[in-house]
Amino acid sequence: MKHRLLLILCLSLPFLGNAQEDYRNWRKGPLTWNDFKTVAHDSIGEEHSYLEFFLYIQETSEEHDGVYLLVQSAEAGMDRKKSWVDSASRTPEELRYNQVIFNFAELYRRYMQIELDTGGTPDVSHYMKLLVADVEIFCMETRFGADTAAVAQWDNYIRENMTAVAPDVAENHSIMIQRMSTKENYKTTNRFAAGMGAGMKIPTGDFHKYFRTGGGFYMECEFGYGRQVLGGGLFLGGSRCLESLCHHTDTLDYLLKNDNLTILDLKFDYGVAVVDNNHFRLTPFVGVGVLGYCVEVTSEDTYETTLVGPSAFSWRAGIDFRYHFLTNVTQSRHSREISQLTLFAKTYAEQARFSNYEGNPRGWTFNIVIGLAFHETTREQKQ
């Protein structure tokens, strides 16, 4: 008996949703003759019926508290259009014979699900080849269902293996999803984010005398483990010089009043999230960096353009607030991969001192940054 390799890889529900009449999942319960097309009594050889079965991977999306869980599952199904029985063979024995074949498909589906649950990516074509080979052995040894005693032995054998492979297969789906969607069952193992936005830098102290409030672009990336977050960022903006400022020794390093300035602020931060859930994250942080106010100067001799102006190491402290407005979760039984689009707002105070310049100006800048970030987080199920 030849079973064609009907290999179907499903990435969404439309496969089953739009073809409910043609395809039937093993989970729907035992087969009935309504699942087969009846043909005239003209069977070829020993075959009196035929079951077209297949395996596939399905990815479903379910919303729970505003979070979309993307759950991958292995599935076994049959094609009603291509499955048939001759009109004289609609007997309980023949139906049991086909049910055993369908149970073979379910057994291999469970093998695939185990691979999915342990982080693997099942090769559907490989499992189909193994499945077809086993079904052909079954068909030959039972003489295509004519040996009812052999069919019964195979039936018991397959059912025992199905129970051994996945004894909890009858677990209620809603309970499983509820367990998956409960954040307390998981711990964050690592995280990554990248984002960009815009902000403003408000000088105070001595800085208020020399620099006007500036605005600019902001870029960041961050890495983390658990609630700990290590981030880096760059603020690139513009300002204006309010008073001339000269270097102590380098006569070519100076700023003149009304010069248009470039603000360069490179930072490295460390924080610990005090609030971290599917919708919000609040992270106090401290950090160090380099702050500079620069102007372009062109050499009269070489015509090369360089940046001159005060720069110094700085330290900072602040609050990072994030709102996750779109969350997708790819779920297995032991881990989840979370992708999020996030609006963030940061406010922090930064202190620096330009000790190499006249007056040794020292001051603070108060900073506000808003932007959009993309987050990837891995959470492992707690033991």
Image (tube, rainbow, N blue to C red):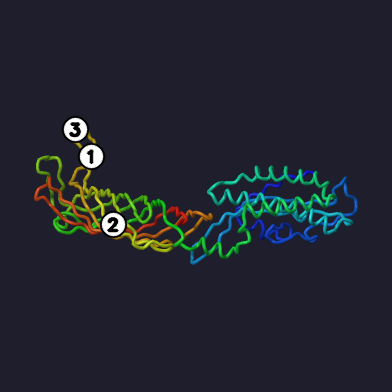
Q: Which label's residue is closer to the chain start, 1 or 2?
A: 2
Q: Using the image, tell me which numbered label, if any, was put on residue 285.
A: 2
Could you say which quadrant of the image residue 382 lies in?
A: bottom left
Mark 1, Cα crowd under 10 Å, few <14 / some 14-19 / many 20+, is few
Could you say which quadrant of the image residue 29 lies in?
A: bottom right
Can you see residue 374? no
The residue drawn where x is 78% and y is 61% is 32
Q: Position of residue 62 (x, y in %)?
A: 55, 62
The residue drawn where x is 47% and y is 56% is 381
Secondary structure of the residue carrying tag 3 is: loop
In the image, taking residue 283 as reference, residue 246 lies left or right, namely left
Q: Position of residue 278 (x, y in %)?
A: 44, 62
Disc 1/disc 2 C-alpha distance (Å): 34 Å
The residue drawn where x is 15% and y is 58% is 205
Tell which tag, 1 or 2, sits nearer the viewer: 2
Considering every residue shown, the one lying at the far bottom of the view is 65
Disc 1/disc 3 C-alpha distance (Å): 13 Å
Kind of residue at disc 3? Asp
Q: Position of residue 331 (x, y in %)?
A: 52, 56
Closer to the camera, 380 or 261?
Answer: 380
Q: Position of residue 171 (x, y in %)?
A: 60, 62
Secondary structure of the residue carrying tag 2 is: strand
Q: Which label's residue is closer to the chain start, 1 or 3?
A: 3
Q: Which label's residue is closer to the chain start, 2 or 3?
A: 2
The residue drawn where x is 26% and y is 52% is 287
Kind of residue at disc 2? Phe
Kind of residue at disc 1? Thr
Residue topped by disc 1: 306
Residue topped by disc 3: 301
